[in-house]
């Protein structure tokens, strides 16, 4: 493609022909710089933007670090952030935008499993690597029949640094039954892929342990009045509520619950946000699980935390900051391997080669060792249970789940 640059000379407009960007990017091995774009998809506006902006900033920090340290000689990384508004239809549109930009060799995100479902096939068809720091829906990597033991990876281009709901739900059930000593639970989900899948996984393990599900219900994630379901919970004799969903609805559900009956609400990583506490004046005692260990407790995360603070981002890195940095760095490591194997430059089939390299990526990341199994799942199955204590999330138990 020929780019025409307008130059004003002595009152006249002159058009100067310049080489295309693609031509500029082709390295001759003499020090030319090639540009690699890493896409970023997350909810950057709306109710879940606190998590989305933390994801965006953490990916941005990884890209800036790679450029500063010249991690891949001859390659400059850029980030292209797109807002999916937590809507699958928007995520699908964003996927096509990333695919259409030939400089994009990998995409970080999204936050929501339902959004991921709309992106997986087009990315796989385009051989464009996708790494989510937050998706936990088990079916995304192991197929719809995983519960029956028939695991089959449906989309080869999809990876994640967050572990699955099969692991998270089991961990939550064990914590509530064995550690919190709660035997009677009312189960609620928001009917979205993430929330429903997490609730189902929790139920399976909780009942196996001998726990009793004293009632079940579904809510609309856009609702904020939950008094009808609270009345049911109160009459059930439940000692806790397990909610499969995210904090925008989970916070008012918890507050209205405690207005009626003093029992805790427990949820997954979609609840583990500072905004859950901001939106819920009665969050004290509530419980959430999240992937990995708190980065504040990891020696491997000290530099990330310091660099994030120095960068001056106004939004917190939130629950997925460390995992996002590692997801972004995994793409950078794959690009590095591809460039090194091709005499210091990007090959013509760079997307396909980066996708091949992802399966072999292994490094020490912010969250600990980073690598992927045959399904594209992280090999790090560490989970943490948190409880709101003194107005903030406090870690209670961290362990790897087999």
Image (cartoon, grey):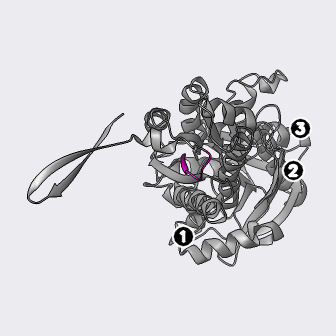
Tell me what residue is drawn at x 49 percent, y 33 percent. 99
- Which picture quadrant has residue 280? bottom right
Tell me what residue is drawn at x 52 percent, y 68 percent. 315
Of labels 3 and 1, the one closer to you = 1
Q: Which residue is mark 3?
A: 208
- Distance in Å between CA atoms under marks 3 and 1: 35 Å
369 or 201: nearer the viewer? 369
Looking at the picture, how far across and down is residue 112, in whole percent? 58, 43
27 or 315: nearer the viewer? 27
**Image vertical order of residue 166 relative to residue 235, above or below:** above
Q: Describe the element under mark 2 as helix, strand or loop.
A: helix
Q: Which residue is mark 2?
A: 174
Looking at the picture, how far across and down is residue 82, in whole percent? 45, 47
Looking at the picture, how far across and down is residue 213, in whole percent? 76, 41
Tell which circle, 2 or 1, labels the residue nearer the N-terminal end: 2
The secondary structure making up most of the magenta span is loop
């Amino acid at each position: 493609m020929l780019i025409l640059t307008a130059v004003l000379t002595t009152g006249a407009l002159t058009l100067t022909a310049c080489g295309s960007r693609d031509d500029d990017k082709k390295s001759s091995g003499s020090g030319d710089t090639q540009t690699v774009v890493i896409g970023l998809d997350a909810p950057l506006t709306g109710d879940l933007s606190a998590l989305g902006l933390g994801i965006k900033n953490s990916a941005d920090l990884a890209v800036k670090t790679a450029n500063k340290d010249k991690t891949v000689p001859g390659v400059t990384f850029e980030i292209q952030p797109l807002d999916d508004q937590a809507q699958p239809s928007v995520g699908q549109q964003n996927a096509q935008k990333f695919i259409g930009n030939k400089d994009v060799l990998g995409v970080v995100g999204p936050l929501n499993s339902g959004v991921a479902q709309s992106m997986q096939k087009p990315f796989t068809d385009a051989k464009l690597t996708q790494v989510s720091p937050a998706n936990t829906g088990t079916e995304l990597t192991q197929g719809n029949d995983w519960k029956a033991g028939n695991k089959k990876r449906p989309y080869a281009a999809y990876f994640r640094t967050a572990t699955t709901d099969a692991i998270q739900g089991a961990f939550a059930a064990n914590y509530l039954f064995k550690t919190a000593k709660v035997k009677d639970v009312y189960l609620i989900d928001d009917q979205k892929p993430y929330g429903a899948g997490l609730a189902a996984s929790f139920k399976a393990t909780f009942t196996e342990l001998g726990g009793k599900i004293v009632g079940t219900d579904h809510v609309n994630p856009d609702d904020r009045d939950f008094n009808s379901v609270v009345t049911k919970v109160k009459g059930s004799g439940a000692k806790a509520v397990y909610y499969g969903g995210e904090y925008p609805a989970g916070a008012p559900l918890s507050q209205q619950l405690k207005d009626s009956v003093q029992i805790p609400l427990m949820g997954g990583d979609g609840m583990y946000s500072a905004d859950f506490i901001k939106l819920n004046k009665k969050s004290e005692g509530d419980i959430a699980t999240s992937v990995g260990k708190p980065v504040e407790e990891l020696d491997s995360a000290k530099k990330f935390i310091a660099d994030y603070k120095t960068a001056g981002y106004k939004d917190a890195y939130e629950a997925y900051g460390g995992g996002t940095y590692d997801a972004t760095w995994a793409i950078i490591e794959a690009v590095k391997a591809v460039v090194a194997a091709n005499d210091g430059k990007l090959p013509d089939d760079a997307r396909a080669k980066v996708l091949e390299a992802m399966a072999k990526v292994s490094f020490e990341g912010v969250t600990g060792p980073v690598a992927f199994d045959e399904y594209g799942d992280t090999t790090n199955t560490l989970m943490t249970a948190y409880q709101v204590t003194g107005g903030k999330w406090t870690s209670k138990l961290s362990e790897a789940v087999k």
